[in-house]
């Protein structure tokens, strides 16, 4: 075994010739955003294995909850926990609509 194989193990060498400028830019921006989130939240939420996954938007949440699958399941689930979940989900949806109304701007 020579010194080059010790300093540059085959399993750890990555060839970056296929990365475009856009890929590199996006990786840097993801790292900056992750660092800012870590400083704001006071924790280490950085996923070392891949890019930072953005938080779902309000629209994503509303789209997910508006599917009939959730409502149908809760309707047929005969359990007090299902009623509690329906109540909490309804309260969250109402609050999202209130927040949306507060953020609306009057158009003249």
Image: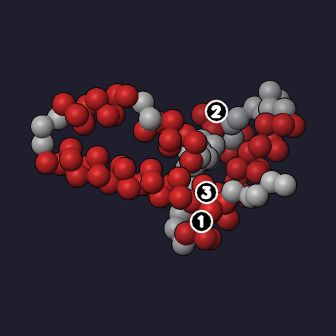
Q: Residue furthest right?
A: 21
Residue found at x 29% / y 46%: 86
Specify whether residue 49 is in view: no
Mark drawn on residue 10: 2
Q: Secondary structure at mark 3?
A: helix
**Residue nearest the observer in this picture, 60 or 89:** 89
Structural distance between the alpha carbons of marks 1 and 2: 33 Å
Secondary structure beneath disc 2?
Answer: helix
Q: Position of residue 10 (x, y in %)?
A: 64, 32
| Label 1: few (<14), some (14–19) or many (≥20) C-alpha neighbours in 10 Å | some
23 on left or right of 100: right
- Mark pair 1, 3: CA separation: 30 Å
Q: Nearer the viewer, residue 14 or 37?
A: 37
Give x and y (percent) for residue 47. Answer: 55, 50
The residue sitting at 51% across, 36% down in the picture is 63
Q: Quadrant of the C terminus?
A: bottom right
Task: Work out which quarter of the rendered image holds the N terminus and state it.
Answer: top right
Point out residue 6 in the picture as x, y percentages from the top left corner: 64, 43
Q: Is residue 78 left or right of residue 35?
A: left
Q: What residue is rendered at 44% in x and 35% in y? A: 66
Give the quarter of the image for residue 9: top right
Q: Is 14 rendered above or below residue 49?
A: above
Q: How many residues crowd mark 3 within 10 Å: few (<14), some (14–19), many (20+)?
A: few
Q: At 55% from the left edge and 40% from the top edge, which residue is drawn?
A: 60
Whether residue 17 is situated above or below residue 82 in the rendered picture: above
Q: Which residue is mark 3?
A: 101
Residue carrying label 1: 38
* Residue occupying the far front of the picture: 108
Q: Is residue 97 above or below residue 77?
A: below
Q: Earlier in the sequence, mark 1 or mark 2?
A: 2
Decide which of tag 1 and tag 3 comes sooner along the chain.
Answer: 1
């Amino acid at each position: 075994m020579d010194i080059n194989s010790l300093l540059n193990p085959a399993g750890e060498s990555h060839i970056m010739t296929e990365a475009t400028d856009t890929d590199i830019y996006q990786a840097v921006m993801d790292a900056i955003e992750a660092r800012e989130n870590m400083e704001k939240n006071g924790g280490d939420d950085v996923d070392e294995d891949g890019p930072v996954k953005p938080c779902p938007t309000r629209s994503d949440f509303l789209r997910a909850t508006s599917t009939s699958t959730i409502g149908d399941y809760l309707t047929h689930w005969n359990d007090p926990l299902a009623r509690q979940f329906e109540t909490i989900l309804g309260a969250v949806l109402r609050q999202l609509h209130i927040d949306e109304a507060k953020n609306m701007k009057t158009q003249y």
